[in-house]
Image (cartoon, rainbow, N blue to C red):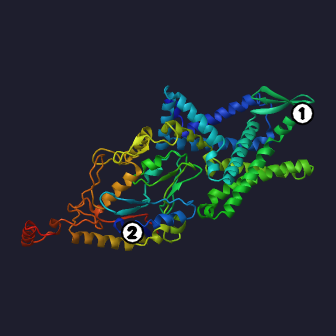
Amino acid sequence: MNKIMYLEFERCIGCRACQAACRECGDHDAKERNYVEYVDFTESRQTYPMLCMQCKDPACARVCPANAIQITDEGVVLSAMEEKCIGCRNCTFGCPFGIPKFDFEENKMYKCDMCYDRSKHDIAPMCASVCPSEAIRFIDFDEMQQLRRRRSQMNLVEGKKPQEGNKWEYVPEFFGVYTD
Amino acid sequence: MKSLERSFYSKSSKYSFIVVLLLFFSIWIGTENFLHFDMALMGYLISSLIFAIGLTIRMSSWLLRPATRQVIQRSLQNLRQRKYKRRNMKAILKTAFENIFLQKFIFKRGIYRGVQHFLIAWGCIGSFAITFGLTFGWMHFELVDPETYTIVVMGVETISMAAHGFFAEMVYNGLNITASMVLIGVCMALTRRIVNEDVKVTQRAEFDLFPLFLLLAVTVTGLLLTVSYVLLDGWMHHYMTLVHQVTVVVLLIYFPFGKLFHLPIRPLTTAVPMNYQEEWKVDTRPCLRCGTVYSSDPQVSDVKEILSVQQFDLQLEDGSYLSDYCPACRRRIRVMKQLNNQPHLQQGHNPILTRNGSEMSGFGGRRTDDYYNFPEHVQKELKQYKEEGGNE
């Protein structure tokens, strides 16, 4: 298994199908764990989808006083374990991407786990499988590299020239690399 | 103190030694110089000591984590401060009663789950209290006269009771009662884990089911002992005690390392309303960029400290930290960077300028002409055209 999640923010049409699909995923209790938001509503109608980046060394797990956030062998960062989570919300404030959500009623944190139950069997996560504009995709690592290369070429064609240090700013987001 | 510490391999080994030493002294005092020592409980005693060592090692390695340490330090600091005394006491008592005694938050996840967890939790805690009290010799029964028993705790006589009174029967059957609670709870939990599709998806056999089976084995063998001597005239009683002992030993050794470890770390919950919330569920700290309140000052400073201890560099160009922004703004900052747009970090910003050469593709606005790098003669013509009042 060598698949990754690939986000292209510009392709987002704001339909929120990914959120609806997320609510349907097993064990999510009809609460979505991803986000669709406007970049700046006063300026444009551009929306973007946002999911957990599945960091290799996740800040959320590092700031958890209860040691409740587990990482699977494939590198998927799971929601806080229900029995350990003390509901302090440190993860929400530690995460650089603002991903973990908090359920005050049930006193526990929940976050995107890349639909671990699906993706571990090589099935696309719910959000990726329903996205109509391919803003969220679950694709092969090689395909991702090709897409990114094409994107940087397009940027060059459009006149955006990446400098030495900021190449990453010119290519779309990808995360959750599965290793063989 | 330093020399004491140096005589051990590690902090956890030092604490384990101290814990075992204290337990030994408590046995000495409790059994009145080993006079009332119950040799039949020897196996339980040894496994309880192993349990204590395992628990100490796990607890100390957990407390040494930067995040846990920060929260504990903050709690201690808070407790010392006089002006927060009222708030602290209120928070501790309220959380201890609602979250730990009543386990309200689990009832909110469903009444079935609440009842099941309540039964298992209090059944286990009760069983542990009775078992440890007896195995470490902290308490035993003494016959005062043929009709009266007394409970001796740590060498001090406490409650006297009629040998066949209602209270006495409750005490003798204490373990049976707690075991029945656990048995009902475990059966409910197992049913849920077999029936509920949502749980099936995420559960792990070794992590979620094994402790349940272990508890089931302990309670069933324990209750069979009672069945054996009450109904079957002690048939197979001796063998059953051995089987029961084996299950308890496995449980005690597993306890500190598996899922059941959440029991000793749960009291940390009290730290949350005490340190981070002046009022329950009310945020006070405004986001640097959009001004919505999203957290409290002590929590954000704690998060920053924990991250910096672990070499997470989340400081931005203008000196602010990512944790100074609300989660929504943090996501936006991320996406703007990705779309090749400098996010306005501090408060009071104007709308983002997108018609300035580095436009996000997909945005509606037209690009300025100098973006297209027209040849000079075309630029001249365009300029002339505009000056004459031509539409773009």
Give yes or no for contact between labels 2 and 1 (Cβ–Cβ under 8 Å): no
Residue type at mark 1 is Ala
* Residue B384 pos. (x, y %): 6, 68
Task: Please give the residue where the numbered disc 1 appears in the rendered image.
Answer: B163
Q: Is residue B15 visible?
A: yes
Q: B144 left or right of B250? A: right
Residue B52's quadrant in the figure?
A: top right
Question: Which mark, residue A135?
Answer: 2
Vertical side of A112 occupied by B81: above or below: above
Chain that bears disc 1: B
Q: Residue at x 93, y 30 (%)?
A: B146
Label 2 sits on a secondary structure element that is: loop
Residue type at mark 2 is Ala
Badge 2 and badge 1 in a common chain: no
Chain that bears disc 2: A
Residue B16's quadrant in the figure?
A: top right
Q: Residue at x 80, y 39 (%)?
A: B39
* Residue B58 pos. (x, y %): 57, 44
The answer for how far apart the CA atoms under marks 2 and 1 are is 76 Å
Determine crowd level at label 1: few under 14, some 14-19, many 20+ residues with C-alpha closer than 10 A: some
**The one of B310 and B290 positioned closer to us in this rendering:** B290
Q: B298 left or right of B44? A: left
Label 1 sits on a secondary structure element that is: loop
* Residue B245 pos. (x, y %): 77, 48
Q: Is residue B52 visible?
A: no
* Residue B17 pos. (x, y %): 60, 36
